[in-house]
Structure formats: C-alpha cells, structure tokens
Amino acid sequence: MDSFFKIDNYSKMKFSLEIGPHTNLDALPLIKDVYITFLPGGSHEETANKAANLLKKGFNPIPHFPARSIVDESQLKEYVSRCKDIGVKQALVIGGSREPVGKFDSSIQLLETGYFEQMTIGIAGHPEGSPDISDSKLEKAMKDK
C-alpha cells in the first residue's frame, strides 16, 4: 500500500474536519484544521472551550461565528476576544441557518465590526443556491464579503 494512505500521514494531507462542541477529541485523526460548529441552541462558550482543548492537543481550531446565533455586539466581541486570547488564529464567519436571535442576520455585519482583525477569516456561500435566500441576494452577499 502506498504510504500516502497510512494513518500516520493524515497530518500531511490537505483536508479538514468539522466537529461539534461535544465531540471526543481522542477520536480525531491527526489532521491540522478542525472546524467547530456553533449550532442553534448551543453556546459560544462551549465552542470557544472546544477550541482551547483542540489547541492544547496541537490542532488548528477554526470556530464558527454564525451571525444569526449571536445575540448582540457585546456577545460577539466577548466570543472573538475569548478565541483570540486562547490563541485561535482562524474563524469561519457565516450567516447561520436559523432565524436571528439578535441584531445580526448576515456574516457581512459581523465582518464590518472589525473584531476579526489579526485573524484569518473564512467565509461561506451557497454556490448551488439556497431556499432561504434569493440568487440575487446570494450574489450580492458574496461580492460584499
């Protein structure tokens, strides 16, 4: 078998993994980038705590920042600051798939706060379209980002 497929070479492959805040970290393969969801009903604290645990184990955690799950600017600032303070270098800024719980309803609003300075920011879109947003709004959102 080609050594490329051996489990000890996962860290050399160019792929990432997405986990939830309650995922057992001992079960993760040896990869670099691990995205952490912040699902509706979850909390930014549990997502940030999972990022801290991933850092301790040598992973590069990339927490989700879903606009529609952020209550207000104070919560966003605290979440971003907490992640930066523990050493998180990347963030995935998304709209989120829920009704807004606060004033934010799009990722561009989070980006415009300036809180993500000094971080590498990933964004998402729906190139295949979405039943929740018109094609013209999707196109505008991607251009804005």
Image (spheres, helix red, strand yellow):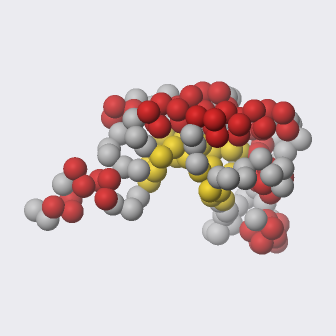
Q: Nearer the viewer, residue 2 or 68?
A: 2
* Quadrant of image for the N terminus: bottom left
Residue 81 percent across, percent down from the top left: 71, 37
> Relative to 14, is 99 on the left or the right?
right
**Residue 40, how many percent across, how many down?**
68, 35
Indicate the position of residue 60 as horizontal and vertical percent values. 48, 46
Q: Is residue 83 left or right of residue 75?
A: left
Towards the viewer: 2 or 137: 2
Residue 101, quarter of picture: top right
Q: Residue at x 21, y 62 (%)?
A: 4
Which quadrant: the C terminus? Answer: bottom right
Please provide percent x and percent y for residue 132: 76, 55
- Please indicate whether residue 29 sits to the left or right of residue 54 in the image: left
Rendered position, 142 above or below 27: below
Q: Residue 77: tell me if it is visible.
A: yes
Q: Nearer the viewer, residue 131 or 115?
A: 115
Tell whether 99 sits left or right of 32.
right
Task: Tell me how many marks there are.
Answer: 0
Q: Residue at x 71, y 40 (%)?
A: 80
Q: Residue furthest left?
A: 1
